[in-house]
Amino acid sequence: MAKLTEIRWHGRGGQGAKTAALLFGEAVLGQGKHMQAFPEYGPERMGAPVQSFNRISDEPITLHCHVTSPQIVVVLDPTLIGTVDITHGLPDDGIIVINTDQPASKFREQLHLNGQKLYTVDASTISRETIGRDIPNTPMMGALVKATGILNFEEMIADTKGKLEKKFRSKPEVIEGNLKAIQRAYDEVKSE
Amino acid sequence: MANLKEIVKKGEMLAPGHRACAGCTFPVIIRQVLAASDTPVVCGAATGCMEVTTTIFPFTAWKTPFIHSAFENVAASISGVESAYRSLKRQGKYDKEVKFIAFGGDGGTYDIGLQSLSGAMERGHNMLYVCYNNEAYMNTGVQRSSATPLGADTTTSPAGKVKPGKAQMRKDLTEIMAAHHIPYVAQGSPSHWNDLVTKAQKALAVEGPAFMNVLMPCRLGWAFQPQFGMQIARDAVNACYWPLYEVEDGKYRITVTPKEKMPIAEFLQKETKFRHLFRPGNEQIIEAIQAEIDTRWETLLKRAEMGC
Amino acid sequence: MKQINPDVCAAYPITPATEIMQIFASYVADGLVDTELVAVESEHSAMSASIGAAAAGARSMTATSSQGLALMWEMLYIAAGLRLPIVMPMVNRALSAPINIHCDHSDSMGTRDSGWIQINSENAQEVYDNIIQAVRIAEHPDIQLPAMVTYDGFIISHAMEPVDTYETEQVRKFIGPYKPMYSLLDIDHPITVGAIDLTDYYFEHRRALAEPTFHVLDVAEQVAADFEREFGRKYGIFELYKMDDAEVAIVVLGSTAGTAKVVIDGLRQNGVKAGMVKVRMFRPFPYKQIAEVLSSTKAVAVLDRSDGLAGMGGPVFGEVRSALYDSAKRPITANYIYGLGGRDITLAHIKSVYDDLLAIAKSGKLPEKLFSYLGVRE
């Protein structure tokens, strides 16, 4: 089977973890790749830990089982680290991207990494400054693409721009804000 | 006001030869209600006496289009028919004027059918629901329903050595329907045909849901000789046991006021299902029934007076 | 549904089918469809109103899942008995008790005697294609039976996957206008729908109801052929995956088939002659066709995502075994009940089934147990 990439997103109910996977899935589709995007469902309450997933491949994906060994983990809420085992199933060459204003070294010990690469980006601040609200999922897409190279960034920006223009025709500041958010996260994500 | 000459000219929409009991009063009710409409109607019925006796394959007594699907859902079924009508009309696929009437017994209306009735009324479908109320599940052998009055002897609330019949007062479904704030709600009796037909005319004329609760004396369950059906219905009205009133856009009006109010004991004596109430020791039940009737009648009078 | 543009949709929300109704309601609110949406107060009323609407000559659709399907159970039989071609997307979700909102097939399996056509989907593309075809199959003049299109709750219903959609005009041309067999609104020719039968007529009416079920599979194949011509995608009673020379095979319904394809590809790379029969048309049951397709294999495992609690395995197992009974050459069959309440079925699980099958094929002996549970903590 063609190379399959699996991503797991960690967030808290109400933060947009599900939307993050869906948004990213749409971006993947926009580049002509095959994808799946789905959340994990339970009786969530606002603030409870939630997970969502993506699968990406150049060929059609027929798998319908759970994602148990993602190559990439994205953490939208750093307070989850320590509560939830965010590295569960992550291989030694896996990648973690965390939304935080703290340096990566702060988490490295906590996470007992085995060689996995750690990236951080302050997506919350970026989104507050560009979109006006703490919605880390949009800028995280930019950080994710920089850290993993999984999509062509220019194409993704163009595709996202097109989609936003359709949806928010009357609100140019929303379009601008979102695009800036993605660009900034792409530029500012740090590896350690 | 209904005009007898006009009604007679219309012709019967329910064919004779159906299998209702001799002396059954629901065929009278059907014919009176259907006579009230100048527009073609589509009818539905819940499982019950009416449905079972009028649609025995390969015969049907209904000259109108008719649907029966199950016991608890004639309101939902007819709401589906009415929705199809509105959809097809809106799309220009249908151009006739049709009205919709759902018939249900007290079983399929007060009890198992209450949910679907409430749902259909709340959604505002343009339909009339007629409950033919014989105060028990008669089709299946006289079991109690929530329309059965206090003290009645039925097979599931029998009067025995220790228990004197049904222990609960009847539910006031007409008031429940009035509380849905639908445009028209009324109580009727086949004994007062002009009142009933006029009410059915009003009910069919409103835009939106209408509900009529019609007392239906049952010769089998109430045990009277077949020729006395109308008389018993009339007595029920005169005892204020079954007040004839209407609620039109929230305004209460009593449409028939008895000249002399018959004491309830006199009325109860006519039905064997209350026979045990006349044994010594059960006087308080008759008193309780009289008290309920008096309270409800007083309340109705007040509401009608206040015009609310 | 938007492209089909039914005249009436009477529906009640239930997880995980709720989104169908919500999204469709937004189409109604935006005037994108002509549908009369009836927000009924229970699933029982949803099917009742659908029956009323269909009997009045309107194309009717509804959608539900699990407990909702269970609540409308009596009405399902009535819809079929009244020959009303209602089409219903039905999201597979486990039945209580215990209450569980995740996927298994207990809900649709429980209604398999109702007379409804059952078409199963593996993924989102199939759901879309199957619903379009279901309208044609259900409304076919020789059929006139209601049809449900099933798909796995959450796994498919709440996952985003790419779907190729077709032009609305193309879809509408394919399904054509609805020509009802009868209508309550034909007031010049009044009819009684739902009459009571005594002992002298009921049997004949039910025998008459069986007649169209003998033609459903042929019609489904004709419609699939038309569908392929029009839209370019091929469908059949089954999807046969690498069955031509398969020695060991599984029979499966729904999304698990997709995961199994990955396992089979791996096995084939290692020289194992593995295959799969994915059942698309489950009701009526294609007993002749399945016997034909399986007879040349050595060992077959039927995967059931529901437990009929009959003491002899799952419902699909019973039907497959019965279908094979008369075959001169037939495989040894095993049954695995899996995935109840949304329990994940993994590549490893499916591989273990094939390992068992290879052992069975080698030994030529019946498995130790008639059926077993896959993926549960015993």
Image (spheres, coloured by chain):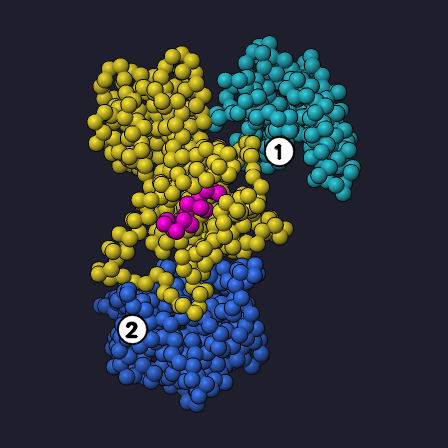
Instruction: Name chain B's colour.
Output: blue
Q: At 42% from the left edge and 28% from the top edge, which residue is drawn? A: C257
Q: At 69% from the left edge and 30% from the top edge, which residue is drawn? A: A159
Q: Residue furthest bottom?
A: B259
Q: Nearer the viewer, mark 2 or mark 1?
A: 2
Label 2 and label 1: CA atoms lie apart by 63 Å
The residues colored magenta run C131-146
Whether label 2 touches label 1, CB < 8 Å:
no
Tell which of B282 and B120 is nearer to you.
B120
Q: Residue furthest front?
A: C229
Decide: is B214 above or below C112.
below
Q: At 56% from the left edge and 37% from the top edge, which residue is drawn? A: C165
Kindly state the secondary structure of the residue where label 1 is placed.
helix
Tell which of A61 and C303 is nearer to you.
A61
Tell which of C296 and B259 is nearer to you.
C296
User: Where's the C terminus of chain B, which quadrant?
Assistant: bottom right
Label 2 CA crowd tier, 10 Å (few <14, some 14–19, many 20+): some
Mark number, residue A19:
1
Q: Is residue A157 left or right of residue C313?
A: right
Kindly state the secondary structure of the residue where label 2 is placed.
loop
Instruction: Name chain A's colour.
Output: cyan
Residue B290 in the image: state x and y as whole percent.
Answer: 38, 78
Give me the chain that's yellow: C
Residue C172 in the image: state x and y as whole percent.
Answer: 53, 47
Q: Identity of the amino acid at label 1?
A: Thr
Which quadrant of the structure image shows residue C247?
Answer: top left
Which quadrant of the structure image shows residue B101?
Answer: bottom left
Q: Which residue is tagged 2?
A: B18
Say which chain tag 1 marks: A
Say which chain tag 2 marks: B
C172 inside magenta stretch: no
